[in-house]
Amino acid sequence: MQALLSFEQAPPIAAPFRFFLTAPLFLALAGVLLLIDGAEIFSSRWSSAALAATHLITVGFMLQVMIGAMVQILPVVAGANLARPLLVAIVVHGLMVAGTLALIAGFLGISALAFPMAVLLLVSGIGLFVLMAALSLCGVPSTSATIAGFKRALLGLLVV
């Protein structure tokens, strides 16, 4: 499998790193929320603070890392080059960060417009990434389990 890797097709390092650099900040925000509302977080899994902490970890951290990894791995492993990877990463990252912060603001009751704004931003960011990744994978045959797995992962992300 090593011979199939194509490191020269890797996107600019700024494309995936923006996701990797901001992801830990969402974990830090979850930690701050735990310090502030720790009793409420553990009182019920349906409390606003518990939902906010859960989404800081899942959407703010895990989804950021997964998208950053896909931006980096698709061209190297699958040979599926994203069109204008830096521009796609900048736009998707901005939408994801803003959408996650709006989602947390909605859970914490900061603004009545936070949930609709979060939906708009997150759906736009994830949709753009899935579209661009799917376009890059269109011409790539599923010759390995890895490439087929990428295609299934994108479909799963779209469904979720």
Image: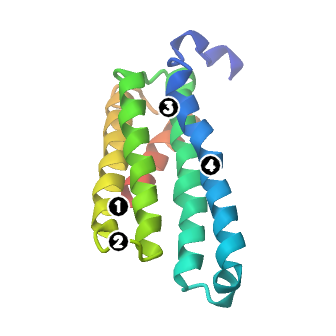
Q: Front-most of 160 and 140?
A: 160
Q: Which mark is residue 118?
A: 1
Which residue type does callout 4 highlight? Leu
Residue 13 higher or lower than 21, as above or below: above
User: From the image, which quarter does the N terminus lie in?
Assistant: top right
Q: Which residue is mark 3?
A: 71
Work out whether mark 4 precedes mark 2 in sequence or the reverse, and give the earlier one. 4
As helix, strand or loop, the secondary structure at mark 3 comes to helix
Query: Label 3, label 4: how many angstroms apart (C-alpha)?
Result: 20 Å
Disc 1/disc 3 C-alpha distance (Å): 23 Å
Measuring from the top left, give residue 35's x and y in whole percent.
72, 71
Residue in front for this viewpoint, 21 or 109: 109
Say which residue label 2 marks: 111
Among the two numbered marks 1 and 4 on one chain, the one whose residue lies closer to the N terminus: 4
Res. 121 in view: yes
List the residue tagged with mark 4: 25
Q: Residue furthest top?
A: 8
Q: Mark 3 packing: few (<14 Cα in 10 Å), some, or many (20+)?
A: many
Front-lying residue, 70 or 49 = 49
Q: CA distance from mark 4 to mark 2?
A: 22 Å
Q: Amino acid at mark 1?
A: Ala
| Real-space Cα separation, disc 3 to disc 2, in angstroms | 33 Å
Q: Is residue 21 above or below residue 96?
A: above
Q: In whole angstroms, how far apart are the C-alphas of marks 1 and 4?
A: 18 Å
State whether residue 145 appears in this view: no
Closer to the N terminus: mark 2 or mark 1? 2
